[in-house]
Amino acid sequence: MTFDYAARRARLAELLPACEVHALLVTSPVNVRYLTGLASSNAAVLVRMDGTAMLATDNRYIEAARTLDVPSVEVSDVAGRLAAPGVGIEAASMSVAAYRRLGDGLGDGLVPLGPTVELLRSVKDEDELELIRTACAITDEAFADVCPRIAPGMTERELAGLLERRMAELGADKPAFDTIVAAGEHGAIPHHAPTSRELRAGDLVTMDFGARYQGYHADMTRTVSLGPPAAWQRELYELVAAAQRAGRRALAPGARAGEVDEAARSVIEDAGHGGHFRHGLGHGVGLEIHEEPFLGPSRTGRLEDRVPITVEPGVYLPGRGGVRIEDTLVARAGGPELFTKTTKELLVL
């Protein structure tokens, strides 16, 4: 899929006067890819206020860079092209060493900026949304194919491997992140790394995974029961499902991130489990698995149209287990569009 990278750089250039800089040196690899199409581990793009730009990289990527729609040079030439003070830099991605090296010739002329390209990236065009939609479809299909194979005696690590292999067979670039499989008491650990622990009858098993497709990420979590659930397990599942529904309903352009979080969190708090929901409600997805915006109690920004985001409440009971249910959706003016479509009914395997 071909994107209009020049238009993306033009939108960034329009933001520079408010940042009080005449150019921005973009060094985050993800942001360089977003603005130029170059996927690399060592590149930078200088975007000027007038919309012109220059891409710098090393010999490993220079030939690929020269096929793009932006003039390219060797990365060693960047310092000489900055020209004058008042150049913005990405404070979150530039190392101290690089800052000092570039600043030698400009004195105090480098201006550290907060998220700028990231805010542009948060609102997706329809082509980007289609790639995320495909990544989510791969994720759904992999779960449907693997689910009948889940049984006592399988280890967490084996189940994670099955999900990742099936996503690759269905066309994923690779997993969107390290797959989480948490069985039984491990379900109380939100980011549990799979182990050799075997699945057992009576376990709740939480699987958090997703496919990456053409650089864009999916994210989904489902919790299943191995055999008929105990009363406390079903009660916990129904609570989290109710919170997740409330969070999904609150997604809308113009909604405050903190208010969306509160819509789901209040359901869990009212049930007496507020202390067992220990993370934010969700996060944006795109070229990164975690990107702007973030849904949490202290988040103040507002959602915009065409922002893909997760809704993933969870309740975690130390020593007993937990439940998390997560979907990837996109905020739309007419109501959120669901990208991950696997049932949220409690599956009893």
Image: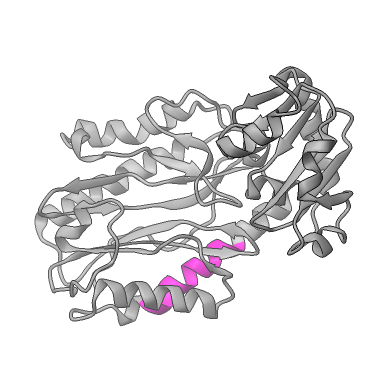
Residue 108 vs residue 72: left or right? left
| Magenta segment | 134-146
**Quadrant, the C terminus:** bottom left
x, y percent for residue 181: 30, 65
In the image, residue 153 above or below residue 116: below
Residue 195 vs residue 218: left or right? left
Question: Which secondary structure dominates the residues rendered in magenta?
Answer: helix
Instruction: Please report the residue visible at 56 percent of the width from the left and 35 percent of the height from the top.
Output: 96
Residue 163 vs residue 168: left or right? left
Q: Nearer the viewer, residue 331 or 298?
A: 298
Say which quarter of the image contains residue 334: top right
Q: Nearer the viewer, residue 205 or 158?
A: 158
State whether residue 119 appears in this view: no
x, y percent for residue 16: 76, 25
x, y percent for residue 29: 64, 50
Instruction: Please report the residue visible at 22 percent of the width from the left and 32 percent of the height from the top.
Output: 269
Instruction: Please report the residue visible at 21 percent of the width from the left and 31 percent of the height from the top.
Output: 270
Instruction: Please report the residue visible at 17 percent of the width from the left and 50 percent of the height from the top.
Output: 235
Say which quarter of the image contains residue 49: top right
* Residue at far front of view: 104
In the image, residue 212 above or below residue 124: below
